């Protein structure tokens, strides 16, 4: 971790927490960037809370990269926490690559960009190889619990027939943006309109399904996903009966006439028995339950920070959490 | 997996099952070896059950290696399933290395041989590097559930304070040798004598603890392990009251005045609530329970077979399940 220097791009809730985690591990900051007027121009320490860090927050990532481009080191990484969708984030990734930095991003679609943005994925891969840097999209979901970890557990099997992962997240226990993202409090009609506009949904479920299938050696010929509202049958945590508590999404991988990978995600206010379940049908059968599940925000920060040394040491090009070894000796994990 | 050829050494219960799993995946056999008079000289297919394979079981591994030494390929691996202790297995490993084969073995002490056999570990590492082959000791425990998988789960954490893994295995549901290994049916005195003679115990618990601590970046200054009998309070599965049902072992890693890694293993006949629990105290906290646990024999076979392509593609020298990436894209896992 000593050789890693981070340019932190995007200082929303996740970016701020990633910044705090990196600071607590003594990582060097190349700088930080966020266009918001209440952030740009300030010292990063003010935004993270705590002492001054003598790291100026730039209004654009371009300003951040340019001064050091001539003295780029192999452990320089842009950590981009700006959005979930490739069209918005891809130019930011490309800018960082061309400045000679590896990229680790929480962009959910970047977890397996070839699924929906094959052309962009090819272009980023080529640019990353040209500049000898790696790119990785990760977080806890996509990035760990529904793909990489399920694959790790299946690694104990002589034979795998089917993998089923079910996450139940109580949105009442999470921050405001998550409640908004899952549509808590909306009418059914508002929920449907939000889904149609691409504003409501957990991004990355089909990407996790594709990664898991790929890791299991099952080339998916079709991935089908669904999304529907979870509606309050009684008033729940201040949300009236008949209003939306959250969402229920699924992604199923079809291989021939089989559906060997199925992911099931409920994120809703007041949902009972929150937790993450990973079931591997095969020889031997395996059935894991994580009580209360992986905390989305905290585990995403952990996955991002822990990935950095592996990306810095890994091969160039566009990587995924199943193409790049991410579990192993990494002093970064220690306290 | 197409490029892998296996020399299977040791045709006890685990070796036979590894052989079946490899055959079902279409792996090429260089041959097999076992000195037992009822095995040597027969066709491997007769021992695995099923059709003839035209693979003669040699009485010694030396016979097995010599004919092909001149045409060694990079994917040639000796899978050695002969014993739990390094003094017995190390010469077999060395013989395979010198014949130019990678080695994957279920030898429990090989999972982290530097812990108890530092000189032998150094010698094997040097020999493996010289011959450009890798060595790995693995199985499910040591090899996955109490070390590698706990580390994989902790990879979601911003901060790890302590890891606790507890396995409870109902020996009544497992094969005879396991019942014998845990002392089921013995008197307390016979149990104590068996422990003193090194005949009773699950080998590899301190090795798992050391691997996990190493992966977490906590150099252990002391690992302390305990072993005690589980005694029947009432007649259980045909074992009289007062007799031994099995064993309870622990391994604790001490770092300064802290004990940040604790492993707890019970293997006994009729023990309630069998399963594997992995608890990570930290940020975020994580608590996983595998109902019924990882089946020791089946998951060991799975871990061994799934490791082969990673060892063949990995760096030379003595590896461990936390130094070598073992989770990722491996078509070997598919059906």
Image: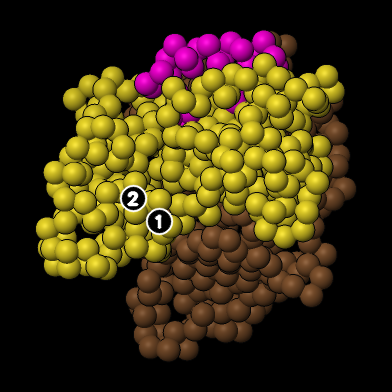
Chain colours: A brown, B yellow
Secondary structure type for disc 2? helix
Residue B180 image label: 2
Chain assignment, label 2: B
Residue A120 image label: none
Q: Is A207 placed left or right of B264 in the picture?
A: right
Most foreground residue, A91 or B33: B33
x and y percentages locating residue B302 in the rendered image: 58, 49
Magenta stretch contains residue B224: no
Quarter occupied by the C terminus of chain A: top left
Q: Is B159 placed left or right of B330 in the picture?
A: left
Taking the spot 69% from the left edge, 41% from the top edge, the residue there is: B41
Chain assignment, label 1: B
Taking the spot 47% from the left edge, 35% from the top edge, the residue there is: B83
Total marks placed: 2
Q: Is mark 2 in CB contact (under 8 Å) with mark 1?
A: yes
Q: Main secondary structure of the magenta part?
A: helix
x and y percentages locating residue B85 in the rendered image: 42, 29
Q: Disc 1 designates what residue?
A: B176
- Magenta span of residues: B109-135
The quarter of the displayed image where residue B335 is located: bottom right
Q: Is residue B71 above or below residue B235?
A: above
Magenta stretch contains residue B110: yes
Most foreground residue, A219 or A46: A219
Report if residue A279 is visible in the image: yes
x and y percentages locating residue B171 in the rendered image: 34, 58
Secondary structure type for disc 1? helix
x and y percentages locating residue A330 in the rendered image: 50, 27
Q: Is residue A188 above or below residue A329?
A: below
Taking the spot 46% from the left edge, 72% from the top edge, the residue there is: A268
- Distance Cα–Cα, label 2 vs label 1: 6 Å
Judge if badges 2 and 1 mark residues of a common chain: yes
């Amino acid at each position: 971790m000593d050789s890693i220097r981070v340019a932190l791009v995007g200082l929303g809730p996740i970016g701020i927490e990633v910044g705090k985690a990196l600071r607590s591990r003594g990582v060097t900051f190349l700088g930080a960037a966020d266009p918001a007027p209440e952030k740009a121009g300030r010292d990063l320490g003010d935004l993270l809370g705590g002492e001054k860090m003598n790291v100026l927050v730039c209004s654009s990532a371009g300003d951040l990269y340019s001064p050091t481009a001539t003295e780029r080191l192999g452990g320089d990484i842009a950590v981009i926490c700006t959005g979930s969708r490739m069209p918005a984030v891809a130019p930011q990734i490309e800018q960082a690559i061309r400045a000679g930095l590896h990229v680790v991003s929480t962009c959910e679609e970047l977890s397996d960009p070839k699924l929906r943005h094959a052309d962009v994925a090819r272009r980023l891969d080529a640019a990353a190889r040209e500049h000898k840097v790696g790119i990785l999209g990760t977080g806890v979901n996509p990035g760990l619990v529904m793909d990489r970890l399920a694959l790790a557990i299946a690694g104990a099997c002589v034979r795998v027939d089917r993998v089923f992962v079910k996450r139940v997240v109580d949105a009442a226990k999470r921050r405001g943006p998550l409640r908004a993202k899952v549509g808590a409090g909306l009418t059914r009609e508002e929920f449907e309109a939000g889904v149609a506009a691409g504003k409501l949904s957990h991004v990355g479920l089909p990407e996790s399904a594709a990664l898991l299938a790929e890791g299991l050696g099952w080339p998916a010929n079709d991935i089908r996903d669904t999304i529907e509202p979870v509606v309050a049958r009684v008033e729940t945590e201040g949300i009236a009966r008949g209003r939306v508590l959250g969402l229920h999404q699924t992604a199923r991988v079809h291989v021939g006439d089989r559906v060997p990978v199925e992911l099931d995600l409920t994120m809703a206010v007041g949902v009972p028995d929150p937790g993450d379940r990973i079931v591997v049908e095969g020889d031997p059968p395996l059935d894991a339950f994580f009580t209360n599940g992986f905390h989305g925000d905290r585990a995403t920060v952990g996955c991002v920070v822990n990935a950095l040394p592996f990306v810095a040491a890994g091969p160039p090009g566009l990587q995924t959490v199943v193409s790049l070894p991410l579990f192993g000796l990494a002093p970064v994990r220690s306290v």
